[in-house]
Each structure stands twice: as C-alpha cells, then as structure tokens.
Amino acid sequence: MIQGIIPFSHELVKRAAKEGDIVVDATCGNGNDTLFLSYLVESSGQVYAFDIQQEAIDRTKQLLDEHKRNNVTLIKDTHANVDEYIKDKEVAAAIFNLGYLPKGDKKIVTKPESTLSAVKKLLKMLKKNGLIVLVVYSGHPGGQEEKNAVLEFVTALNQQQYTVLQYQFINFINNPPFVIAIEKK
Ligand SMILES: C[S@@+](CC[C@H](N)C(=O)[O-])C[C@H]1O[C@@H](n2cnc3c(N)ncnc32)[C@H](O)[C@@H]1O
C-alpha cells in the first residue's frame, strides 16, 4: 500500500533517529510530530520543539502532558534561531510541517526566509546520515512562494554531500502536500 504523506515522513525519520538522539520539531503546531519524536528518542533522548505561537506551544504541552512525556524542550521562538538553543550537539533528525496551524489563525504561516534559514542551520548541525524532512503545503496565500523557494534551495544541494528526495502524489488535485527529505551523507 502506498503510504500517506505524514506516515511516510515519520517512516523516514524512524530510520534516521533512535533512542537517545537529539531531534527537532521545527513547527510543533498541535504537537503531533513532537509526540511522535518524543516516543522515538525515548527518555534518554531530547526533542527541541519550536513554534512562534503561544497557542501551538500550549496545545503541544497539553498533548505531551496527556502522554506523560518529559523529554521535550518547548521553545516559543522562530526555528530560524535554532542554533541559539542547540549548541555543540549533533542533531539526528528534524521535521518541518509548513503552512498554518490547523484549527488556528490561517494568516500565521511559515515564511520562505525563516524556513530556509532554519534548514541551512540544521544541515550544519545534522550528524552523518541525519535527516531533515519537510512537509510542504502550498494551497494557502504565500504557500506557492515558500514551495518554490524550498524546491529551488534543495534542488541545488550538492549531491556529494546530500541526498534529496521528493515524495508526491502527482494525480491529486488542489495543491496536495508533499515530502522533501534531505539526508546528510
Ligand atoms: C502546519 S503547522 C504544524 C503542525 C504540527 N507539526 C502538528 O503536528 O500539528 C505549522 C506551524 O508552524 C508555525 N510557525 C510558523 N512560522 C514559524 C517559525 N518561523 N518558527 C517556528 N514555527 C513557525 C505556525 O505557528 C504553525 O503552528
């Protein structure tokens, strides 16, 4: 069976990160990816979860509390500042879920400049065979520009240093989301 976008993105991350690792949720939103990462790296690992909205931080905290997870550092700041929070540590995997907070303010969206700034910083922080996964949504205002900026950047990454994958349902209508995965060689 062909895997959906989110299960496929999680499957890739499962191959890159394991118990004890440091991982990043660059856009925690409702906390679903954060919770997944928290279980993946177990109590000896650490998740750094970013969002610029207090509402997202609160929802993620509530979800983590419900599951009694305590290996997550929640950070209300832009992911573009990721290097201010994670220093001298190698990151095994990072997830970006672009766009707006579901059931939130649709006008607050990820932006090309900060997204790419965070991706560039995380590429430097990744360990060998580490992975960055981006789930790219483009149907909202500004989404097309961000999609183009992400694609332009990742397409130009040196293949000696990185492997870049695009996973997409090509017969779906209405700007379906797709996955970009960058593995550091
Ligand atoms: C599609 S939602 C994330 C969904 C989330 N991964 C989940 O599992 O529910 C995108 C999130 O990115 C956040 N966001 C937008 N710009 C950001 C930035 N510069 N840094 C961190 N988060 C940002 C939004 O506030 C929103 O909550």
Image (cartoon, rainbow, N blue to C red):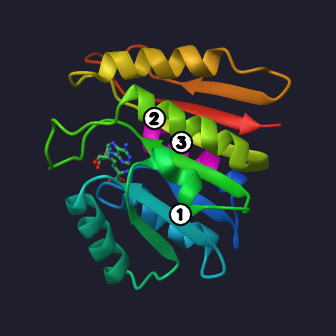
Secondary structure under the numbered disc 2 in the rendered image: helix
Say which quarter of the image contains residue 110: top left
Say which quarter of the image contains residue 34: bottom left
- How far across and down, in percent of the image, does residue 122 sit? 63, 44
Secondary structure under the numbered disc 3 in the rendered image: helix
Q: Which of marks 3 and 1 is nearer the N terminus?
A: 3
Answer few, some or many: residues within 10 Å of disc 3's Cα (few below 14, many 20 plus, some between 14 and 19). some
Residue receiving disc 1: 37
Q: Which amino acid does label 3 sit on?
A: Phe
Answer few, some or many: residues within 10 Å of disc 2's Cα (few below 14, many 20 plus, some between 14 and 19). many
> What is the number of the mark on residue 8?
3
Q: What residue type is labelled 2?
A: Thr
Residue receiving disc 2: 115
Q: Main secondary structure of the magenta part?
A: helix
> Residues in magenta?
1-13
- How far across and down, in percent of the image, does residue 158 sit? 77, 20
